[in-house]
Image (cartoon, helix red, strand yellow):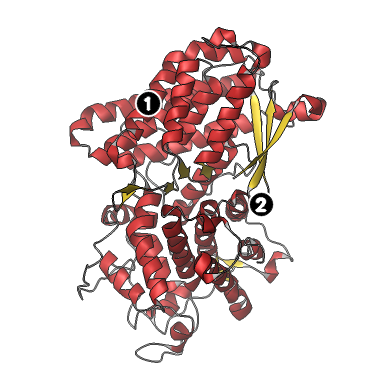
Amino acid sequence: MEDANAGTNRVLRRTKIFAPKVKTGCITCRIRRVKCDERKPICNRCESTERICDGYGPVPPRKSTTNRLSSSKSATLPANATYSKTTTSTREPPILQQISSISKILMSLEEIRSFEYFRERTIPSLSGFFDSPFWNSYILRAVIHEPAVRHAVIALGSLHERFEAKDPTILRSNGCKFDGGFALEQYTTAISRLIEPISARGHQALDIVLIACVLFTCFETLRGHHGSALSHVQNGINILRELRTGKGSEHNRSMPLSISTMPMIPYSMLQVIFTRFDCQSMRLGADTGPFDYVTFSEKEPGFSESIPSRFGSIQEARLSLEYQERNCIYFLSKGRPNNTNDMDSEKQEVERCRHLADLNAWLTVFEEFLQASTAKLSAVETQATRLLQARCLVFLDMFSAANLTNEMIWDEHLDLYSRITDLATQIIEDPMYNCKMNGKTVPVFSIDSGVAGPLFHVVRRCRDPQIRRKAITLWRATPRQEGVWDGLLALKVAERMMQLEEDGLGKVNCCADIPHDSRISGFGLQFHQREKRADVFFSKRWPLTEVLRRNPGAIIQETLFW
């Protein structure tokens, strides 16, 4: 099959094209700024492109960000939910109206089954412990109006059903319909429909391409093609980079992206999603970013440089932490030896202390939020708070040391590693963490960072044999796909680190039994694009890139398969 990244690669380049306002025609065509033939009750253009024609009348105004967030909490509905004919004056239809509209455009029983699975099982799984307007509401609206998104959602729902059934055929590359090929068929169709508007009208909507990148990343990650998934992440990041710089060229005018003033999903929300992917990728050793943020008129509450004096919700606290995590990872990336900056310079030491102060400030405000709202939190929200605490503690640990070349300093942080492991234990041992279907535990796939990152950090930095092995045992008991993190793959890397450090030392009873020269201080992953394997590089001299440049023979290189 043709490289699955072809769709987003072909529409990666962007030129600003602002289509003139269309003042006549159906609502759908006016929103899309295309000429409408005004046939009633359904225009030819909507019918030919498999879109829902919203009829004729004034284009409804958009809701404010606050209203969108508050009205999107009803993520999934019972399968027997019925549609009330109540109309709405906003562009974002009620969830029941969206589902009713979608049911009219699904062509086959397989499509209906996969979409229902996506709605009932995939959306809650992807959302994790946090409310997600992107999955709970916006993506359903995009399914109605955009065939590329619709086919990608059906593909993801079909693949996720087989993933939860532990069907090994999802890892195959063939297209047999009875061997998992329906999902691949829908995926290929989604790519074709994504690039189709370029031939028809010379451009594709930028927000639709970004939505497709998100869905394609999820699809490739779920089927174990992590190299392809990271390529889709990179494509989305490159689009956002160009959106910020406003650069164009003669080359990219042949396949431009148009910027809609009324996108299907707010650009600010899409930027947050790619920030999550970017941070996950860079922590795995992939070099996808970071990218500078674009300032949009609509902002996600909490996603900003400044930390508020109080958090109004868990979602605001989460977005605030994610912004700080991004800043921390960006700082660490600047310290690579191929950069002119020196990690030990006075300027970078000041910056490190500033990030450490920001993390402590976030934790203080968050603990005050917990004290004021503990009695009001649901079971899911309680789990979310534990996860945020664990993630913050990881970055506090990373920035607490000025000299990252001394691996012995981490031995002083055992209390912190115990606290992170205890938080992970509380999350994992909660019955709601283990997803069940028909009474059986099924594997979990989430777009968000979960316990894998904190547990990986504990195994990597903590040399206490009891704490380290407890983290591995917890991790092995409930392997999960978390964003671009493959739980089993990351677990293999962590276990191999421990084996390399303890090899030849006999029985390890405490941290001091592992000398500095035996400790792994750097690692990197290089995924193969079309194969389910990755090259892993371990170094006992920090940082890895400097060792690769000066003494490649000191690198331990191995290949992992899955």
- Camera-side residue of 286 and 482: 482
Q: Which mark is residue 268?
A: none
Say what amino acid the circle numbered 1 marks: Leu
Please identify the quadrant where the C terminus is shown.
top right
Name which quarter of the figure residue 530 lies in.
bottom right
Q: Which of 226/137 is in front?
A: 226
SS for tag 2?
Answer: loop
Residue bearing mark 2:
531
What residue lies at 22% left-to-right and 33% top-to-bottom? 373
* Residue ID at (63%, 67%): 256
Q: Position of residue 352 (x, y in %)?
A: 56, 22
The amino acid pointed to by label 2 is Glu
The image shows residue 404 at horizontal and vertical percentages of 62, 19
User: Dot 2 surroundings within 10 Å: few (below 14), some, or many (20 or more)?
Assistant: some
Q: Pick the quarter of the image with the N terminus.
A: bottom right
User: Is residue 158 visible in this depiction of the protein?
Assistant: yes
Residue 516's place in the image compared with 21, above or below, is above
Instruction: Looking at this view, name the residue that lies furthest to the top.
Output: 512
Q: Which residue is mark 1?
A: 363
At a point 56% along the width and 30% down the height, the residue shown is 494
